[in-house]
Amino acid sequence: MSISIDTIRIGKKYYLINYGERHEFIVLKRISEQNFLLKDLMTLEQYELQEFIQFGKGNDFELFELEA
């Protein structure tokens, strides 16, 4: 079952599916109530969560915590 953005915790690893794209990341810090600084686990690039949902949430939008 997918989790809510409200349950994201700093230092945890997650993956997000939106519009058919899957992104795995670790949360580095909270920027605002609904925005976080993330580090991609594959490319090590840093970006903000809002970049993934700036064009809306697709019908396939899901957020999951990666198992340790």
Image (cartoon, rainbow, N blue to C red):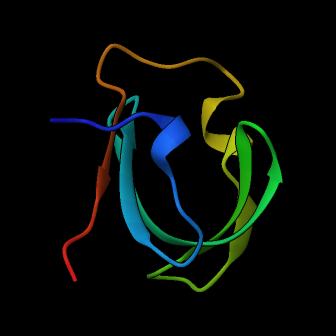
Q: Is residue 32 left or right of residue 11?
A: right
Q: Which quadrant of the figure contains the C terminus?
A: bottom left
Q: Is residue 16 left or right of residue 64?
A: right
Task: Report the label total.
Answer: 0
Asked where in the image residue 30 lies, by quadrant, the reply is bottom right
Q: Is residue 7 above or below residue 34?
A: below
Residue visible at 77% across and 38% down in the picture: 33
Q: Is residue 65 above or below residue 56?
A: below
Viewer-proximal residue, 49 or 34?
Answer: 34
Q: Is residue 48 above or below residue 13?
A: above
The single residue placed furthest to the right in the displayed view is: 31
Q: Position of residue 57 (x, y in %)?
A: 50, 19
Asked where in the image residue 48 lies, by quadrant, the reply is bottom right
Q: Position of residue 40 (x, y in %)?
A: 54, 74
Residue visible at 44% across and 82% down in the picture: 42
Specify whether residue 6 is in view: yes
Specify whether residue 22 is in view: no
The single residue placed furthest to the left in the displayed view is: 1
Q: Is residue 67 left or right of residue 54?
A: left
Q: Which quadrant of the figure contains the N terminus?
A: top left
Q: Position of residue 35 (x, y in %)?
A: 74, 45
